[in-house]
Image (cartoon, rainbow, N blue to C red):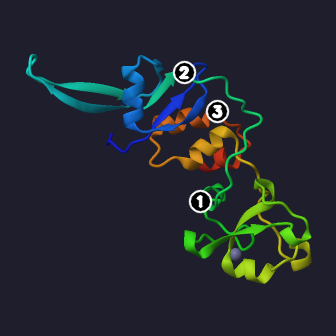
Amino acid sequence: MITNQQILRLNSAGHPVDWINHQTAAKLYHLNQVIYECGSSSLILRGGYNRLKRQRSLLNLNSIVSTNNINKLDYSAFTPPLINTTLFKRDAHKCLYCGNIFTYNQLSRDHVIPLSKGGKDTWTNVVTCCKRCNNHKGARTPEDANMLLIAIPFSPSRVEYIILRGRKILQDQMDFLISHIPRSSPIFQRYTKP
Ligand SMILES: [Zn+2]
């Protein structure tokens, strides 16, 4: 494991909370706030040199840690912040009209029901859309523009959001996260494809 590896933090009930970096994890270990470890991989951090023992201290950080200082999380009321990076990742960088995959710069946020027609800037009314399709659609509904959506926009759950925000997610972390989302989730299907 390398030092920019993210560590998955759970609450005491074992529910995923968020990613933390190794500094935060080291602090939680130091403060004895790590209740148990769930991962199968670990990151070894080298500390300072101890003159008396004539050796460097080593700290072993697990890839998934449960900590006891987080209050109850309300999973049902959670709405992730709506930003394009996460939106495009939700839709796997696919334009939900033409179905092609694009890079970040070629994509835009389309409001299915346009803002000018009373549509909202919310997860269930926005889709990843290539600039060409977005120009073509303009301020029309998909019906009016005769453009069909290939997937239904959804608001990611807390765990889905953690997956979408992950960088270089380790296999044990992914297995753990996937076990916390329903099989019907498009994200479950995307990450469990053979
Ligand atoms: Zn398109």
Structural crowding at the residue carrying mark 2, measured as other residues with C-alpha within 10 Å and reported as few (<14), some (14–19) or many (≥20): few
Q: Is mark 2 within 8 Å of ligand 1?
A: no
Q: x, y (%) of residue 112?
A: 82, 66
Q: Is residue 110 left or right of residue 159?
A: right
Give the alpha-carbon distance from disc 3 to disc 2, as whole Å. 21 Å
The image's mark for residue 69 is 2
Relative to 13, residue 42 above or below: below
Type of amino acid under label 1: Thr
Please report whichever mark, 3 or 1, sits nearer to the chain's N-terminal start.
1
Task: Left or right? Give the position of 11 relative to 22.
Answer: right
- Pointer 3 or 2: first along the chain: 2
Nearest the viewer among 108 and 49 is: 49
Check disc 2 and give the amino acid type: Asn
Q: Secondary structure at mark 2?
A: loop
Q: How many marks?
A: 3
Name the secondary structure under disc 3: loop
Q: Residue placed at 70% from the left, 41% from the top?
A: 157
Of the residues under marks 2 and 1, which one precedes in the sequence? Answer: 2
Front-most of residues 57 and 194: 57
Q: Dot 3: few (<14), some (14–19), or many (≥20) neighbours within 10 Å?
A: some
Rounded to the nearest whole Å, what is the CA distance between mark 2 and mark 1? 30 Å
Q: Residue at x 39, y 22 (%)?
A: 29
Circle on res. 180? 3
Residue 11 figure quarter: top right
Q: Residue at x 42, y 39 (%)?
A: 21
Say whether residue 194 is visible: no
Residue at which label 1 appears: 85
Give 50 or 186, whichever is nearer the viewer: 50
Depth check, mark 2 against mark 1: the one in front is 2
Q: Please, what is the three-letter code of the amino acid marked with disc 3?
A: His
